[in-house]
Amino acid sequence: MATTDDIILPKKVSKSDLVYYQMKEDIVSGKLRAGEPLFERQLCTHYGVSRTPIRDALKRLALENFVETSPSYGTFVTKITSDVILDTYNIREVLEGLACRLYAKRITPAEKRKLKKLNDRLVHLMKNKAYKDAVKVDISFHERIMSGCGSATLIAMLSPIAEQINRITYSTHYDDDDTWTEDTVRLHTAICEAIINDDAATAESKMREHIAISRNHHVTTLL
């Protein structure tokens, strides 16, 4: 594994920052599993840094609910529970629904073509049950809408939620669930068509419906 010494950093980015981002990415992607204990010495070796950047990173990750420290059990990656999913997705439904409405009002013709191409790729992967690849495209689809909504305040509110959403998405088991597949394809297509047709109200409504169905799917497939 490459250590932090192998990476050329901009002057304003510290090793603590880099370790924080690397560790968060490892948690989101599942490389550091939910419930896994985190030992400073092992983390120092793994990320190739001293204890100070590790401690700084753990403090920041604790504030964002990616890790937890207990006097009895030490520090560990937080678990994904049904309550976490429900709380996160309820907030996401409102905020991302609004982001979708704003995005639909300001999208350019060139951006419409890019969004349709992305959705066509997602539909193809879902229909062929290539779920791992579909998840990556799905994340890109939602990130494009969020980043293109035009509201810096809304983006700032959605960004930390989006990271938790990505973690939940990567942790879900995607078995052959034809109903969920059909719902995902149907609603993603409806969202895309509404945006392309400048129908902001329908875009928001379909996005909220899509997120509500995803919330239920993640809860029912949680191990």
Image: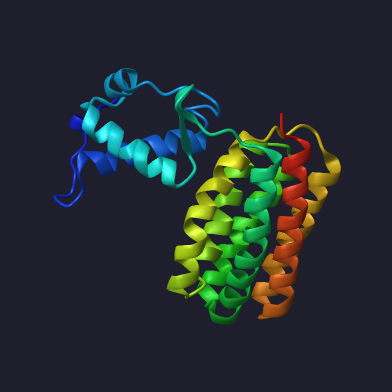
Is residue 133 in view from this perspective? no
Whole-percent x, y for residue 119 in the image? 64, 57
Whole-percent x, y for residue 188 in the image? 71, 59
Looking at the image, the residue that sits furthest to the right is 179
Direction from residue 62 to residue 209 in the image, left or right: right
Which residue is located at x 58 percent, y 33 percent? 79
Q: Quadrant of residue 167?
A: top right
Which residue is located at x 48 percent, y 57 percent? 159
50 shown above or below 17: above
Q: Quadrant of residue 173?
A: top right
Looking at the image, the residue that sits furthest to the left is 11
Direction from residue 19 to residue 103 in the image, left or right: right
Between 201 and 87, the one nearer to me in the picture: 87
Direction from residue 83 to residue 67 in the image, left or right: left
Whole-percent x, y for residue 169 in the image? 62, 42
Which residue is located at x 61 percent, y 65 percent? 96
Direction from residue 138 to residue 70 in the image, left or right: left
What colour scheme does the image use?
Answer: rainbow
Q: Quadrant of the C terminus?
A: top right
Q: Quadrant of the N terminus?
A: top left
220 shown above or below 161: above
Q: What number of labels is visible?
A: 0
Whole-percent x, y for residue 82 in the image? 71, 40
